[in-house]
Amino acid sequence: MAADSSLFPAACPVSVAPMMQRTDRHCRYFHRLLAPEAGLYTEMVHAQAVIHSTDGRFLRHHPAERPLALQLGGSEPETLAEATALGTQAGFDEINLNVGCPSSRVKAGRFGACLMHEPERVADCVRAMRKGAAGRPVTVKTRIGTNHRQEFSHLLAFARAMQEAGVAALIVHARIAVLEGLSPKENRNVPPLRYEFVYRLKQAMPDLPIVINGGVCANSEIESHLQCVDGVMLGRAAYSNPWLLTALPGASRQRRTRVQVVEAMVEYARQRDQRGVRLGAITRHMAGLYSGKPGAGDWRRALARHAPAPASEARVLLDCVPDRLRYAA
């Protein structure tokens, strides 16, 4: 069934962030089993890679993953427009532009968080992407600033430029991006969270949908944020403890048990399009399924032991569940 064209945050107020080397197609299918109501995102992929790929691997996804957004990196409006058109044709429900990645490699390519210093260029990119999106929403994921531009006035000016360009929503990681001296991992933890900046932005721009991201680890925090902004995006917490996704605000009370999730992943892994895939490529995203439960270490070790097996042998996953966890809720 086609997703609502007003995808995020209107139809999906809670979403899972794009995470490099995390939110591939296997991860997204797994997360969809846990959270039918959540919005999902691909890993960031550069627009050039989408355009020049000969096998379409960057656009490959299972229909069950939807509603699903494609996150693009880049700074050339024409290139982004072309990649957006390809993503739209491939069935993505939203196209998102990354203006928040702080890595030095991304900065050297003149995209990611450094683009916060060039709001007019980003606005041009959004306008071009909207032309290629065929009515699908175009959104931007950004930070509250950089170590060179930390004032709220800079964030507000950037957001106004995005709104004038027709952005459908702004997703804001509530930390600055430190563009020199910190690794991407450190940039996720060292700069302090400043949720008040995102709240102030929503107050100043009530007509622009605002989604908050950064450091959200509990459902009580999600509910608190939703009192102030339009949506909440979860990151590493949802990856390390994916069961968190089963209790999102508005989630159905009739959810799969953990063993039923494993059974569904067995069927997924045995599908025809997984030929040539190693089981570990799928199960590495499932390591946290029993996080916090006695015996979780046994589960992780069993997954690692079977990782080299072909995906067609996924039935072994059911044997990986320790007896003491087999009936865990």
Image (cartoon, rainbow, N blue to C red):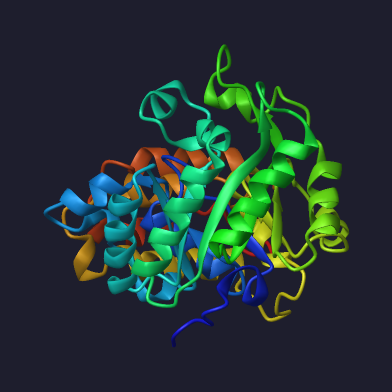
User: Is any part of residue 133 visible from this angle?
Assistant: yes
Q: Residue at x 78, y 60 (%)?
A: 205
| Relative image position of residue 166 (x, y in whole percent) | 55, 65
Image quadrant holding the C terminus, namely: bottom right
Up-down: is 280 above or below 86? above
Q: Kindly indicate the quadrant of the structure image that contains residue 147.
A: top right
When the figure is inspected, residue 297 is found, relative to residue 224, above or below; the finding is above
Please indicate, yes or no, whether residue 292 appears anywhere in the rendered image: no
Residue in the picture at 73% in, 79% down: 253
Left or right of 323? Residue 46 is left
Q: Horizontally, is 185 left or right of 225 in the view?
A: left
Q: Is residue 147 above or below residue 1?
A: above
Looking at the picture, tell me which residue is in the foreground, 94 or 64.
94
Q: Say left or right for 71 vs 51.
A: right
Q: Residue at x 79, y 37 (%)?
A: 152
- Residue 208 vs 172, above or below: the answer is below
Foreground: 274 or 195?
195
Is 127 placed left or right of 55 in the picture? Answer: right
Dividing the picture into quadrants, the one containing residue 295 is: top right
Across and down, in percent, residue 109 comes to 36, 29
Outermost residue on the left side: it is 54
Residue 155 spot, x, y in % from top left: 71, 41
Q: In this view of the protein, which residue sits in the foreground, 182 or 20?
A: 182
